[in-house]
Image (cartoon, grey):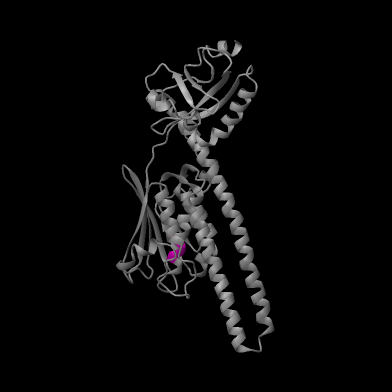
Amino acid sequence: MQAARSISSPKWTLMFFVNTTGEILSLSSPHSAPLGYPSAELIGGRFQDVIHSEDRRLFGRAFRAALESPGVPQEIAVSLCHKDGALQKLPCGIFNLLGQPPIGAVAVCCPEVDASTDAANAADFQYVSLARKVAQMEGELQAVGHDFRESLRSISLFASLLEKKVRSDSEATSLVAHVIRGARRMSALFEGINSFVLSGLGQKVLPLELEAVLSEVLTDLQEVISSCDAKITWNPLPLVWGDELLMRRVFQNLISNSVKYRNGPSVDILVTAETSEGETVVSVKDNGLGIDSRYHELIFGLSTRLHGPERSGSGIGLAICKKIVEDAGGRIWVESSLGAGSTFRFAIPKTAPAPSRPSLPSHVHAGVLTADRKTTKGCDGG
């Protein structure tokens, strides 16, 4: 009788009476449509079917324990699925009343909560579940990437050793050189695809000072910029919301492309930004080769190259930029004509700071410059 008294607790407002297989025989609820289902839809079905798939194993263990020990109620926390797809993480009591007439069933009891009042709880559960899957996917990709890189290193290493042994044979040397170049192109392609896939995983959205992000990118590209006497100028750049590492990747790819496709020994690059009511549009303008209007959409595709092997790279940089920007709810495009340089623009939504958001990290402030206009020649400011 202890179990029968336990289910009379005020916290158990939703009660399912099931048989030993979990089939719902009857139910008791203060609402006409518990979990959004008419009672008639639930009766005859299995209680396990209204439990989120990730919690069914946990429920199964507790259910079996209740069957094996009738006098010991089980209590767990599971996520129940509403008919509209919402989830509720709720405590769930399991009471074996099979031997207690007139009930003669197993009582599965929950404190019913309206889905609209528990939306935050459901969102939290879905977020945790998604984060777990993202972390698992990221780990699997890194493991595959490690094996792939090792295989490419082995090909390059043994091809280089073979090249030394066949130097006297010009035809064999040429063939080995093709193998080495192919391995290098494959490595660049893999790194590009790997970056493309990982670019949308595990984003950390924080307030960013774009000038600080740009400054760090220029430091990273110091050797490339100095080698061609590139001049990068920028106007004051605003605070935006985004992932710092991904925003750096966008700037790095766009500036690297401007340097790579320069029209002469040097290149001038101007970075500006305009903020409207709903978005911030960042522009990266150069005086390079330019792009024919026929290819303005095509260049954002995977592995799209408009130039031959004389230009290094995998052809994935702009596809990565597009994916990063669109994952953030924005858009990216190019304005250019052949021989007249290019202006790449990307728009990102302007999100007003909310009190619950994390504060701006101190390291983001560290590189902010205060002049109205800044210029760097090379990357050492000379």
In this view, 171 is above or below 254? below
Q: Which residue is drawn at 68% across and 77% down?
A: 161
**Residue drawn at x 46%, y 60% as measured from the top left:** 253
Q: Specify the segment rendered in magenta.
A: 254-258
Compared across the picture, whether 199 is left or right of 346 comes to right
The answer to which quarter of the image holds residue 285 is bottom left
Count the numbered circles shown: 0
- In the picture, measured across the screen, residue 92 lies left or right of residue 254, that is right
The residue that appears at 50% across and 56% down in the rendered structure is: 217
Q: Is residue 90 above or below residue 181?
A: above
Residue 263: horizontal and vertical position, in percent? 40, 72
* Residue 379 is at least partly visible in this image: no
Percent coordinates x, y for residue 20 in the rendering:
55, 26
Relative horizontal placement of residue 295, taking residue 240 as reference (left or right): left
Query: From the image, which quarter does the N terminus lie in?
Result: top right
Q: Is residue 312 above or below residue 127?
A: below
> Does residue 45 sit above or below 145 in this rendering?
above
Residue 274 within the magenta-colored segment of the rendering: no
Residue 240 at x, y = what percent? 42, 44
Q: Residue at x 43, y 54 (%)?
A: 323
Q: Who is closer to the viewer here, 310 or 269?
A: 310
- Considering depth in this image, is 230 or 369 the residue closer to the camera? 230
Residue 271 shown left or right of residue 126 in the figure: left
The dominant secondary structure in magenta is helix
User: Can residue 164 be seen here?
Assistant: yes
